Amino acid sequence: MRRTVFNEDHEAFRETLRAFIEAEVVPHYDEWFQQGVVPRELYAKMAELGLFGINVPEDYDGAGLDTHKFEAIQYEETARAGVSFGGSGVHVLLALPYIKMLATDEQKKRYLPNFVSGEEMWALAMTEPGTGSDVAGMKTTAKLSDDGTHYVLNGSKTFITGGVHADRVIVCARTSAPREDDRRFGISLFAVDTKSEGYSIGRKLDKLGLRTSDTAELAFVDVKVPAEDLLGEENKGFGYLGTNLASERWGIAYGAYAQAKAAVRFAKEYVQERTVFGKPVASFQNTKFELAACQAEVDAAEAVADRALEALDAGELTAAEAASAKLFCTEVAHRVIDRCLQLHGGYGFMNEYPIARLYADNRVNRIYGGTSEVMKMIIAKNMGL
């Protein structure tokens, strides 16, 4: 079936990105994997390529486009090469929508040029120790000073992707106590400068997968946040957080599909080269059947991911549709990658093979952005159940 989601401009971008990955990432990736982080210099090179400014208005040094298709190509090409751009995905997919939606013109002038150039990398700090998905239960507070010039931020966050390299972090904090009839009330968002006194980075977390993505704990002790760095209105942060869930879940779905597609490629190449009992592993019927079944699942996931992409770009992707895409694509990726690793035999368990890294990286897809169980609840509610 002919794929229609990308045009000639997108494919030209794909070629440029593929060449960049081969030249700037692949030769160094094993070292970065061992170190557990990509170097900050990679982000500067990505900025030079224009990767951070695609969806930023031209008035702020961006390309002024309004599409997620270039992000989709990045998912496909990094997965194809078995590499990652570290925590930079949060910079574009999670942080940028809040800046575009909530920042005033004055804030955009301060934030976006440095965002595009990579001089200021952004992250999002929502999750706290002990609260998990219960955002309304957060304990971090931000109290306005008596003279109204700044807020005093106290608390902690965990599982913050991009937290080590970040220069600014969108921090969710309580500016008011929750109401008896609305425990979601009272949360506000702040663009916090990580150089502020009292701001500290705790442990760089040791994860099962996504080894090159810098995920950290953050702590705030009497951090002074200028009032002009409040994003949007006070106490309305919970509502703001919900508006970007569809795009976040689409991103996870598309990334999972791309990983599954890459897994089939890795397995196909391996079984054609590997010889057992004097014959290529690819010659055995079981190998052919397994890869054929995996390919069929990838084809289905691609159709779902592409349809969700078109709906997202059109502003029509609903919460239930995003949940359905995430549930389907992440579950497909789980099955496909597991089967492709099995075809590698013992070598599939070795981190020197990209299939092993994919296996570990993929596992979190069914957890973050809302677990598979939460996705089922959203879908069932939309069904009237």
Image (spheres, rainbow, N blue to C red):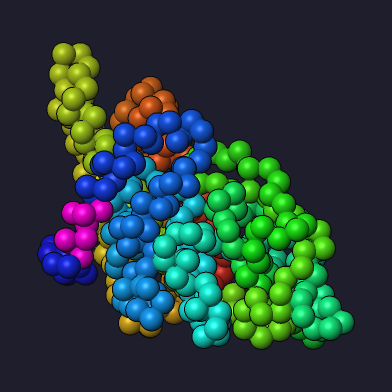
- In the depicted view, which residue is nearer to us: 290 or 31? 31
Q: Residue at coordinates 35% horizontally, 79% vertically from top-left? A: 58
Magenta portion: prevailing SS class: helix
- In the depicted view, which residue is nearer to us: 379 or 191? 191
Is 34 inside the magenta-drawn segment?
no
Q: Position of residue 178 (x, y in %)?
A: 81, 79
Q: Is residue 257 visible?
A: no
Q: Residue at coordinates 40% horizontally, 31% vertically from top-left? A: 30
Residue segment shown in magenta: 10-17
- Left or right? Give the position of 106 relative to 11: right
Is 15 inside the magenta-drawn segment?
yes
Q: Position of residue 172 (x, y in %)?
A: 68, 69
Identify whether 183 is placed above or below 338: below
Q: Residue at coordinates 63% horizontally, 52% vertically from top-left? A: 159
- Left or right? Give the position of 380 relative to 142: left
- In the depicted view, which residue is nearer to us: 155 or 186? 155
Identify whether 28 is placed above or below 127: above
Q: Residue at coordinates 47% horizontally, 43% vertically from top-left? A: 39
Q: Position of residue 304 (x, y in %)?
A: 31, 66
Quadrant of the snapshot with the C terminus? bottom right
